[in-house]
Image (spheres, helix red, strand yellow):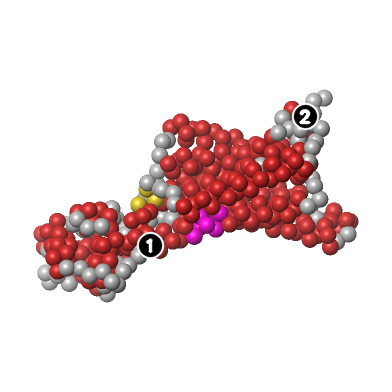
């Protein structure tokens, strides 16, 4: 009878490996922008993780891999170290256009440097007959300290990605004219799922270490640590499925802004002064050209139209009008809507049509903003101008 290479729980990881590898190849051959390239790289790291776990813990596959491809353990170990930076880079590319790297981004290479340092150290200190030096290292006495470091770095990059989203969301009103309907939930959910899974791996390791050191072996055997580890596999399948569903969906509503422009408009200066000509130029342009009717208007768009830098325009709006970019544009849109609602010639137009004409792209956002400004609903406002 032939040996069984995989058990039922291994099938979960095989599915993760298959769909990650399949979609990574599909994305690389059909999508060309940076966002999808980073997504495919992250998917490849997840495929590598699944293959590593199967190789290390799989029923009969472990022995087969040890005999035929012993270098697989050291090779696939890199997946643990690159998944965090790749998640962060994918998050950045999903938020920002023309993503660039700065000197401080050298820290993204730190996990990779740690990996190569460990591999070189293992090659010096360990020597296995079958060439699986890294496997000896994984079975060494103090391997848990290495795994703690690995888990903490992976989780740290997850938190970095989460706070990147938070920072982007907080800065949006200064750069985008319709930030309310933007859906960050799917990206946040994916990053939070990553953090939970990697935190669980660390918690699982801590539990195993403490129980093994503090309790009798009989007690240790009563706790099904294998089941706790298997739960991570199913979590990985769920995370991967959600990632592919949302990341490849056409329903994403996150506008990708220039990172430098977004950061610059949030750095206000109290020392800069603006001439009457500059203030008048912006005001006249808003009144005559009505750029606020564009529901995708961004601060860098308007800045180009009035021949100013995004930072200067944002600072001017804050200093001279005491509002941020979103509030400034919203004030013009509200005036436009009020004019339409009070115009008998627009009586045939529905309120939502009027809102969209004025530059809004969300019914709920418009209703809320209108109520805050007038203390009336749009319908009540319109009725107050109707002929009795």
State the residue lying farthest toward the bottom: 375
Which secondary structure dominates the residues rendered in magenta?
helix
List x then y, in percent, for residue 245. 49, 44
Q: Which dot marks residue 67?
A: 2
List x then y, in percent, for residue 49. 64, 42
Q: Is residue 329 left or right of residue 15?
A: left
The quadrant where residue 275 appears = bottom left
Decide which of tag 1 and tag 2 comes sooner along the chain: 2
Q: Is residue 272 visible?
A: yes
Q: Is residue 164 left or right of residue 56?
A: left
Q: Relative to 205, is 137 above or below?
A: above
The quadrant where residue 366 appears = bottom left
Q: Is residue 105 left or right of residue 66?
A: left
Depth order, front residue of 199/313 = 313
Q: Relative to 127, is 268 above or below?
A: below
Q: Secondary structure at mark 1?
A: helix
Residue holding disc 1: 171
Q: Quadrant of the C terminus?
A: bottom left
Q: What is the span of residues highlighted in magenta in the rendered image?
A: 157-163
Depth order, front residue of 126/169 = 126
List x then y, in percent, for residue 95. 41, 51
State the residue lying farthest toward the front: 124
Residue 36 sits inside the magenta stretch: no
């Amino acid at each position: 009878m032939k040996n069984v290479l995989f058990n039922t729980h291994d099938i979960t990881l095989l599915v993760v490996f298959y769909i990650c590898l399949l979609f990574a190849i599909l994305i690389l051959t059909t999508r060309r922008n940076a966002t999808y390239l980073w997504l495919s790289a992250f998917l490849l790291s997840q495929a590598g993780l699944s293959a590593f776990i199967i190789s290390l813990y799989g029923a009969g596959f472990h022995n087969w891999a040890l005999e035929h491809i012993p270098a697989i353990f050291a090779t696939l170990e890199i997946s643990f170290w690159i998944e965090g930076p790749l998640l962060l880079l994918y998050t950045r590319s999903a938020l920002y256009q023309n993503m660039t790297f700065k000197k401080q981004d050298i820290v993204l290479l730190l996990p990779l440097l740690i990996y190569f340092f460990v591999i070189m150290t293992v090659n010096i200190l360990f020597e296995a007959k079958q060439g699986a030096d890294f496997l000896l290292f994984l079975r060494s006495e103090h391997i848990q300290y290495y795994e703690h470091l690995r888990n903490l770095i992976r989780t740290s990059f997850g938190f970095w990605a989460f706070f990147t989203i938070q920072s982007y969301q907080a800065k949006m009103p200064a750069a985008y004219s319709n930030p309310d309907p933007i859906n960050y939930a799917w990206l946040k959910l994916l990053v939070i799922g990553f953090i939970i899974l990697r935190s669980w791996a660390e918690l699982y390791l801590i539990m195993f270490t403490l129980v093994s050191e503090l309790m009798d072996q009989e007690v240790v055997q009563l706790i099904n640590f294998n089941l706790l580890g298997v739960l991570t596999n199913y979590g990985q399948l769920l995370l991967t499925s959600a990632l592919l569903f949302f990341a490849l969906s056409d329903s994403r509503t996150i506008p990708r802004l220039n990172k430098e422009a977004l950061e610059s408009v949030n750095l206000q200066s109290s020392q800069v002064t603006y001439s009457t000509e500059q203030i008048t130029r912006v005001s006249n342009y808003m009144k005559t050209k009505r750029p606020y009717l564009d529901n995708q208007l961004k601060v860098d768009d308007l800045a180009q139209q009035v021949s100013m830098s995004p930072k200067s325009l944002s600072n001017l709006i804050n200093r001279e009008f005491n509002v941020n970019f979103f509030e400034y544009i919203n004030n013009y849109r509200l005036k436009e809507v009020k004019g339409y609602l009070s115009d008998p010639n627009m009586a045939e137009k529905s309120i939502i049509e009027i809102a969209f004409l004025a530059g809004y792209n969300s019914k709920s956002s418009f209703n809320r903003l209108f109520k805050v400004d007038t203390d009336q609903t749009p319908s009540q406002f319109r009725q107050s101008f109707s002929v009795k």
